Image (cartoon, rainbow, N blue to C red):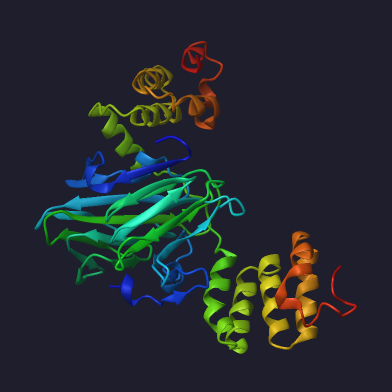
């Protein structure tokens, strides 16, 4: 996790439940900032990617990593073995079910012509992970950032203090120092404890 | 359904030894950068490079087979469903396939900025034509790149390189001068670049 790079095994990463599907919040685990990256996993017959369409301008690419997925895009259904890449333009309805146990699909998304920003959807995932009290420092750190944007300072400090306690390697220190999302808290005396 | 299998994508063999599988270009994706790679004859699958020039964060996901990544001097052997995320653009990274069937997907971009198509995509896609002395096709791709990225110094420079090799000194000098005007570092590159042997004695050549 240190030294400017991170290795992650999708089938071992912490998951979250989103609309009855199993999400691997990859972007969240990596703190990747350049695009939306996530993965979904399911066993045979289960929903893999929840039915949805993306907002205008949002392009999405799905990549089958393991198992086999049955994709339905705009009412057309196809079977996708590992190594398949499926591109879905904005506004088109899509969903996928797993056709084999241990199916994993990697998803990349972003908006045309604008910088990537984590969505309300991404923040909801963060809040869910934190509510499940997962003991990863950055889950609580992100939840804290989310509380700052919602102008709930007391809740933000609670999450951020918890993040600092969980971070045994001191990886969070640079984030506390530099992350502009925390700027609204910096004049609060409680913030000094986070920097100590 | 707009589906393609990684093995059905164009396979562009690069001189550095890896095979580039253009994903973004295949689908016409504009929101983010993504490409796949398979090994060339020497087993290289991800070119040894840094992202310092572009400032990109990059994720490399193994889709199939086994790959030994070397990141900042450290070796990591990864299999299907494992990825390495290189946050620091200055870290040197590369990958060698340990199995012939290996395939890697790369996703990258610059945090906080809208995605721009990278200049190297046009250079890569033109590479087989350049290697085969098929100048008209290569020039058409440089033209396409300049329509997307007008005035891009690296594209102007590559355009000049292949025009010089194609025996078009006037066009080559015009593009080279424009490249140097837009990016001073290209003046230095041009002094020793073998592609410019045919035009280096021309009085118009930038010194």
Q: Tell me: residue A82, above or below residue A106.
A: below
Q: Tell me: residue B149, above or below residue B73.
A: below
Q: Is residue B3 visible?
A: no
Would you say B155 lies left or right of A4 here?
right
What residue is shown at x 51% (from left), y 20% (from top)?
A: A185
Q: Tell me: residue B94, above or below residue B189.
A: above
Q: What number of labels is visible?
A: 0
Would you say A162 lies left or right of B17 here?
left
Q: Nearer the viewer, residue B87 or A187?
A: B87
**For the N terminus of chain B, which image quadrant?**
bottom left
What residue is shown at x 79% (from left), y 64% (from top)?
A: B187
Q: Is residue B77 visible?
A: yes
* Image position, residue B180 (x, y; %): 78, 66
* Image position, residue A143 (x, y; %): 36, 29
**For the C terminus of chain B, which image quadrant?**
bottom right
Q: Tell me: residue B48, above or below residue B137.
A: above
* Image position, residue A101 (x, y; %): 11, 55
- Name, please, the residue furthest toward the right: B203
Would you say B207 lies left or right of A75 here?
right
What residue is shown at x 35% (from left), y 27% (from top)?
A: A137
């Amino acid at each position: 996790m240190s030294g400017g790079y991170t290795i992650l095994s999708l089938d071992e990463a912490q998951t979250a439940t989103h609309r009855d599907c199993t999400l691997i919040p990859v972007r969240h685990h990596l703190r990747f900032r350049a695009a939306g990256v996530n993965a979904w996993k399911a066993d045979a017959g289960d929903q893999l990617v929840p039915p949805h369409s993306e907002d205008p301008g949002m392009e999405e690419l799905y990549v089958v990593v393991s198992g086999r997925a049955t994709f339905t895009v705009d009412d057309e259904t196809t079977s996708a073995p590992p190594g398949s890449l499926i591109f879905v333009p904005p506004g088109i309805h899509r969903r996928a079910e797993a056709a084999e146990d241990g199916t994993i699909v990697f998803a990349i998304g972003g908006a045309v012509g604008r910088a990537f920003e984590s969505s309300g959807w991404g923040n909801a995932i963060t809040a869910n992970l934190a509510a499940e009290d997962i003991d990863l420092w950055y889950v609580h750190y992100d939840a804290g950032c989310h509380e700052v944007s919602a102008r709930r300072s007391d809740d933000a400090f609670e999450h951020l203090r918890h993040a600092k306690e969980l971070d045994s390697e001191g990886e969070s220190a640079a984030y506390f120092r530099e992350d502009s999302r925390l700027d609204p808290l910096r004049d609060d005396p409680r913030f000094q404890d986070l920097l100590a | 359904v707009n589906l393609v299998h990684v093995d059905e994508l164009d396979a562009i063999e690069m001189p550095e030894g890896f095979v580039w599988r253009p994903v973004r270009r295949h689908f016409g994706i504009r929101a983010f950068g993504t490409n796949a790679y398979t090994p060339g004859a020497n087993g290289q699958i991800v070119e040894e490079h840094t992202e310092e020039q572009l400032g990109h964060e990059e994720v490399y996901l193994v889709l199939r087979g086994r790959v030994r990544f070397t990141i900042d001097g450290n070796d990591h052997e990864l299999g299907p469903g494992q990825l390495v995320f290189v946050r620091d653009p200055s870290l040197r990274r590369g990958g060698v396939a340990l199995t012939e069937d290996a395939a890697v997907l790369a996703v990258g971009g610059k945090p906080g900025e809208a995605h721009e198509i990278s200049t190297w995509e046009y250079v890569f896609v033109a590479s087989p034509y350049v290697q085969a002395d098929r100048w008209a096709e290569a020039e058409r791709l440089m033209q396409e790149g300049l329509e997307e990225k007008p005035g891009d110094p690296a594209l102007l420079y590559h355009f000049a390189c292949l025009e010089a090799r194609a025996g078009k000194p006037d066009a080559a000098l015009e593009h080279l001068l424009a490249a140097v005007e837009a990016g001073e570092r290209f003046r230095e590159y041009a002094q020793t670049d073998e592609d410019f042997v045919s035009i280096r004695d021309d009085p118009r050549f930038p010194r």
